[in-house]
Image (cartoon, helix red, strand yellow):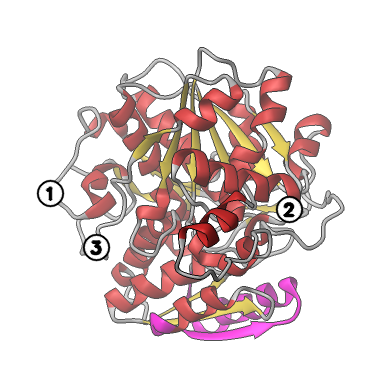
């Protein structure tokens, strides 16, 4: 039986919000906050699973009711030990939750599965998303699976691989010069044409589709199943905090259901530090930090969101930053030591480990999970720029020895 009550609740005021108003964030102190789906956990017995595909095996704890679902068998991703990186940092129980194993190679598939399912159940014929890549590719794929139209508003600067994926899944992709211009156009499409929004569309940013963010709860459920309890620490790459918020709610569900006695500490890994500042100085919607180009382009935000900050505060969490050099070094090290090739934005979680260890935020006796959000194959040119050219040699041992000795 579904625990979803069919309405949402404003996370600050506690007021009930009907489904018809779910996509309209409420203005709070100069910022915006989305309502979140409400559940009656007394309706379910523990972490019930069903025979539905993908993450919908957790249907009782997702906001989709009994209607049809759109799935590409997302979720069920492996939790891999990282002995090489763990030894390097003195962490004997270091893992990566490898979300690159999802259908479009990123964790965004969990969001897209729930958000597109909700759009289909609402009778929408078009979904629209503002994205620099992974989000757009995931929504495009699930819209294709559902047989509905997808429009992606992206930036001219995103890698060609990202644009190619979105277009290959049948999305109509257009690029804008300025990030904020996407939100202006998208809000018009949502309000005037009734298209279902798959991402945020207000500034300062507030987060993505509130139903879709519930898909990230399933990462928490899987970690509990894979470890036998929740981990001590989860480190996630963070921009607008969708995954942080979903993880927090997923772990909170398990506390409420009596499956665990504690919430893991959530830690934000970021290029420029807006969450670190918000934790030090308090959250302000209009607060920004200096930001610019970054190899971790998909999380290179100067803003923190309320939902991300709240998840960190509620779990006694922290934040740490890594620059381009540290991020790309971590990408190479993780791949060479442990055989896991993650996108630059994703591997910020490994890049911040030295700082977190030095600060005592993670310790040797803890179980620590890095959220590996996407594959390094999404942006091969950025990785290739920092690698030596592959030598072309004659077919003899002397030439081989000379080449590999260098």
Query: Does label 3 or label 1 sit earlier along the sequence?
Result: 1
Crowding around mark 2 (Cα neighbors within 10 Å: few <14, some 14 to 19, many 20+) is: some
Question: In the rendering, which numbered label is found on residue 197?
Answer: none
Q: Mark 2 points at which residue?
A: 31
Q: Is residue 200 above or below residue 247?
A: below
- Disc 3 + disc 1, Cβ < 8 Å: no
Residue at 42%, 67% in the rendered image: 138
Crowding around mark 3 (Cα neighbors within 10 Å: few <14, some 14 to 19, many 20+) is: many
Q: In this view, does 181 lie above or below 94?
A: below
What is the quadrant of residue 343 in the picture? bottom right
Q: Nearer the viewer, mark 1 or mark 2?
A: 1
Q: Mark 3 points at which residue?
A: 69
**Does residue 347 appear in the picture of this structure?**
yes
- Foreground of the two, 49 or 222: 222
| Secondary structure category for the residue under label 3 | loop
Provide the residue span drawn in magenta: 168-197
Where does the image place residue 262, in percent across and percent down from the top left? 45, 18
Query: Does label 1 or label 2 sit earlier along the sequence?
Result: 2
Where does the image place residue 65, in percent across and percent down from the top left? 25, 54
- Foreground of the two, 164 or 41: 164
Relative to residue 207, is residue 143 drawn left or right?
Answer: left
Q: In this view, does 316 lie above or below 211?
A: above
Q: Which of marks 3 and 2 is in front?
A: 3
Q: Mark 1 points at which residue?
A: 51
Q: Is residue 182 magenta?
A: yes
Distance from disc 3 to disc 2, alpha carbons, whole Å, reads 33 Å
Distance from disc 1 to disc 2, alpha carbons, whole Å, reads 40 Å
């Amino acid at each position: 039986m579904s625990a979803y009550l069919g309405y949402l609740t404003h996370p600050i005021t506690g007021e009930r919000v009907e489904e018809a108003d779910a996509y309209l964030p409420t203005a709070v102190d100069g910022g915006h906050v989305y309502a979140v789906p409400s559940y009656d956990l007394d309706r379910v017995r523990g972490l019930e699973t069903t025979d539905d595909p993908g993450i919908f095996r957790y249907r009782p704890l997702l906001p989709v009711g009994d209607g049809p679902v759109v799935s590409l068998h997302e979720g069920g991703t492996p939790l891999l030990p990282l002995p090489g990186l763990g030894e390097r940092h003195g962490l004997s129980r270091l893992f990566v939750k490898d979300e690159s194993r999802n259908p479009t190679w990123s964790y965004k598939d969990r969001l897209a599965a729930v958000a597109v399912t909700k759009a289909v159940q609402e009778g929408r014929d078009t979904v629209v998303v503002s994205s620099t890549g992974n989000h757009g590719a995931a929504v495009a794929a699930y819209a294709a699976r559902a047989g509905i139209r997808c429009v992606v508003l992206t930036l001219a600067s995103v890698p060609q691989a990202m644009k190619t994926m979105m277009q290959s899944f049948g999305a109509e992709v257009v690029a804008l010069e300025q990030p904020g211009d996407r939100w202006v156009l998208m809000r018009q499409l949502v309000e005037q044409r009734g298209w279902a929004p798959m991402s945020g569309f207000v500034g300062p940013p507030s987060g993505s589709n509130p139903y879709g963010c519930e898909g990230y709860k399933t990462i928490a459920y899987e970690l509990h199943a894979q470890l036998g309890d929740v981990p001590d620490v989860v480190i996630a790459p963070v921009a607008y905090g969708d995954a942080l918020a979903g993880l927090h709610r997923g772990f909170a569900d398990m506390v409420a259901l009596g499956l665990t006695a504690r919430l893991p500490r959530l830690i934000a890994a970021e290029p420029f530090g807006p969450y670190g500042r918000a934790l030090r100085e308090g959250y302000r919607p209009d607060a920004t930090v200096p930001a610019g180009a970054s190899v971790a382009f998909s999380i290179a935000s100067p803003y923190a969101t309320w939902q991300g900050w709240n998840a960190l505060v509620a779990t006694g969490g922290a934040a740490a930053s890594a620059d381009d050099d540290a991020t790309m070094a971590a990408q190479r090290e993780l791949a060479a030591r442990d055989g896991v090739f993650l996108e630059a934005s994703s591997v910020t979680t490994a890049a911040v480990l030295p700082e977190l260890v030095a600060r005592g935020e993670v310790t040797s006796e803890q179980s620590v999970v890095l959220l590996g959000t996407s594959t390094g194959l999404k942006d091969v040119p950025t990785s290739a720029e920092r690698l030596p050219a592959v030598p072309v040699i004659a077919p003899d041992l002397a030439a081989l020895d000379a080449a590999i000795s260098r």
